[in-house]
Amino acid sequence: MTKILVTLANSHFGTLAINSLLKKVPAKDIIGTVRDLSKGAKLREKGIEIRVGDYTKPETLKEAFKGVKKILFISSIPNEKYPRQNQHKNVIEAAKSCGVEFIVYTSFIHCDENTSALSLDHKYTEKLIKESGIKYTICRNNWYFENDALIWKKCGLEGKKLYNPLGKQKIGYALRREYAEAAALALTISNPKPIYELAGKPVTFEEVGEALKKVSKKDFQIVNVSKEEFAGKLKEDGYPPEFIGMWSFMINDYANGCLNFGSNDFSEILGRNPTSLESSLEEVLKE
């Protein structure tokens, strides 16, 4: 049987992808890589073989990819000490040297035309994959509902104000588990497309807020603020600095429509519509 390997297997995305794969293939045919073997204990309990695979250490990747035909290549987090482009190049070169036949890569929505700074590393990685000669499917993912879970929980559980710095601009949110399910399906279905643009139905912050009121039964205020005011409002309400920093980095992308993409590809690969806005918010509030 074809061995399927999932990189960053102990990450949120990697674990969700493996859970989806387990519905399609036996555990004995799934391999997960982690940077530290101790991080793979829970996956090992499910019958998954765990190998060391560190994007910053090419020798570990070449050892981990031995005997593997298909890889779910989960993109890494930007890293100033070891640039993400270098990390991703290590993965692709190791895959080539080990005879990997098929790669599914988690990219960024419409990264070939997207003006977001987040798209640059993904453009580079997609180019390397296409030039590698390895067959591929690229899953270009839009934003996760979970990325802004702190906001949904502050408002939906604590009744804090929802500050809207985006006006009528929209974001194509979807659940992380459904992006992971799509990636797993790309590894197991016959003849997947080379590229899937994956996104939920684009919604405004105000639309999310109104849906959140319904599911949480909290009648919080939705307050329009400027982009410049937003970080200060988050600080006043006790959001952690790293979350405020993420929003400060991304706010222009949000406001300029870099995440305002929908998609029919999600329904196509899942075989159903993505989870609705209200049901997605209910799920996030319970996590």
Image (tube, rainbow, N blue to C red):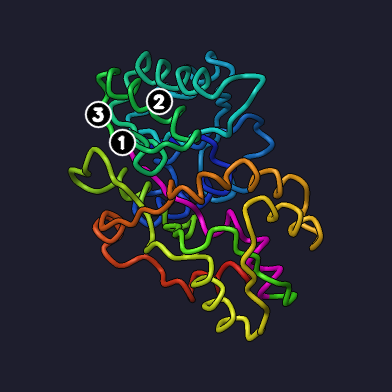
Asked whether the viewer can see residue 173, the reply is no
Query: Which residues are drawn in magenta?
Result: 137-156
Q: In the picture provided, is 106 more to the left or to the right than 44? A: left
Mark 3 nearby-residue class (10 Å; few <14, some 14–19, many ≥20): some
Q: Residue, x 47% and y 65% (percent of image)? A: 204
Give the residue type at disc 3.
Answer: Lys
For residue 125, the mark is 2
The prevailing secondary structure element of the residues shown in magenta is: helix
Q: How far is disc 2 from disc 3 in space, using C-alphas?
A: 14 Å
Q: How far is disc 3 from disc 1 in space, using C-alphas?
A: 15 Å
Q: Which residue is mark 3?
A: 135
Q: Are marks 3 and 1 in contact (CB under 8 Å)?
A: no
- Where in the figure is residue 37, as x and y percent of width and height? 65, 32
Magenta-colored stretch includes residue 138: yes
SS at mark 3 in the image: strand
From the viewer's perspective, is the residue at label 3 or at label 1 nearer? Answer: 3
Q: Residue, x 51% and y 50% (percent of image)? A: 254
Work out whether mark 2 precedes mark 3 in sequence or the reverse, and give the earlier one.
Answer: 2
Q: Which residue is mark 1?
A: 2
Work out whether mark 3 precedes mark 1 in sequence or the reverse, and give the earlier one.
Answer: 1
For residue 120, the mark is none
Q: Are marks 1 and 2 in contact (CB under 8 Å)?
A: no
Magenta-colored stretch includes residue 153: yes
Q: Residue, x 49% and y 21% (percent of image)? A: 85
Q: Quadrant of the N terminus?
A: top left
Q: How far is disc 1 from disc 2 in space, using C-alphas?
A: 25 Å
Mark 2 nearby-residue class (10 Å; few <14, some 14–19, many ≥20): many
SS at mark 1 in the image: loop
